[in-house]
Amino acid sequence: MSSTIVVPGEIKALGLIDEWIDQLVGAWRIPLGTRFAIKLCCEESFTNIVLHGYKAQRPAEREDQMVRLALEHHDDQVQLTIEDHGAAFDPLKVAPPAPVKTIADSAIGGHGIQLMRRFTEQITYERRNSANLLSLRFTLAHKKTPAGETRSLPH
Amino acid sequence: MQISTTTLTPSLTKITLVGQMNAAGAQKIDLSFNVTVGASQNVLVDMTEVDFLASMGIRTLVVGAKALNRRGGRMVIMKPTPDVEQVLIASGIDSLISIVHAQDEALALLAPTQP
């Protein structure tokens, strides 16, 4: 089962994306924890594209700033693929934030990629034909804990 | 996303958030949240009815906590749902802003220290 949507690269499109995901995960009876992970990672990657990838482009390049999202459900896995034509950006190359001990030392942002790493089973990135292709895989039978460990869920 | 405030003591304000703290939700409450933080010594953020938290929502919490800290105050997060608490832990926020699961626990944590 699969579905694809193309939306403008604007933050306000998140409402439309949310509605699209809600309809699919409901129809596919995806467990609640996995739904949360899919919505979280989708919002984080889409926000990065709009606020960083597309914002960095010159005005002449901004006319066709669309984002294509595809959600596929196979057996015990859901895969989310996000394609944009912004500046090349491989989130896998971003180093994890250095741990801080006090709120005074903490950065205000920079949590998105860390959250994507923790709430997905696997992330792959490819730059193809001037497009960024980001694939996020979520498993339904196993739940990845925030500590990065994988454990079986009771049947 | 909805926000409401209650004055619990002269030095402690409770902010109650309801809804999805995503990019749109955070943008909706940012002004009220910052105004309340600016007028409070300590803030207890009740997240019982927040069913989604993303990095734009984390940004709202961190900005507020940093502002309070600069004035010698403190923020405590109360009763996040399990999913929201996982986001707070995964982003390391739990080590910077205390999380409690009962209001009494928060009051004890934020009680003025005796001279």
Image (cartoon, grey):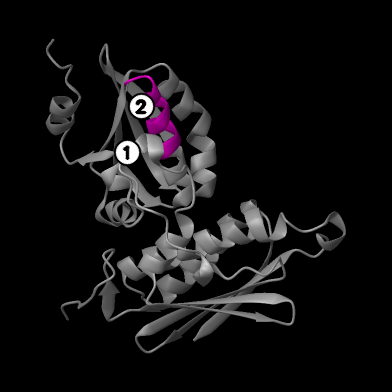
Q: Name the chain letter of the residue that bears numbered label 1.
A: A
Residue A60 lies, with reference to residue A92, above or below; the image says above
Give how far across and how far down residue B94 sits, in percent.
Answer: 27, 46
Tell whether A69 sits left or right of A56: left
Residue positioned 32% across, 38% down in the render: A102
Q: Work out which residue is located at the far bottom of the displayed protein and give it.
A: A75
**Segment colored magenta:** B62-72
Provide the secondary structure element on which disc 1 rests.
loop
Q: Which residue type does callout 1 highlight?
A: Thr
Q: Are marks 2 and 1 on the same chain?
A: no
| Disc on res. B69 | 2
Indicate the quadrant where residue A5 lies: bottom right
Q: Main secondary structure of the magenta part?
A: helix
Residue B68: within the magenta? Answer: yes
Which quadrant of the figure has residue B40? top left
Q: Cα distance, mark 2 to mark 1?
A: 10 Å
| Residue at numbered disc 1 | A102
Residue B42 point in image, percent of width and height: 30, 22
Q: Is residue A102 left or right of residue A135?
A: left
Answer whether labels 2 and 1 touch (C-beta < 8 Å): yes
**Horizontal relation, residue A12 to residue A103: left or right:** right
Q: Can residue A16 be seen here? A: no
**Residue at (12% x, 13% y) in the render:** B114
Q: For the residue labelled by badge 2, is the local secondary structure a helix, a strand or a loop?
A: helix
Task: Decide: few, some or many residues near mark 1? Use Cα within 10 Å; few <14, some 14-19, many ≥20.
Answer: few
In the image, residue A113 lies in the stretch drawn in magenta: no
In what quadrant of the picture does the C terminus of chain A appear? bottom left
Amino acid type assigned to the residue bearing label 2 in the image: Asn
Res B73 quadrant in image: top left
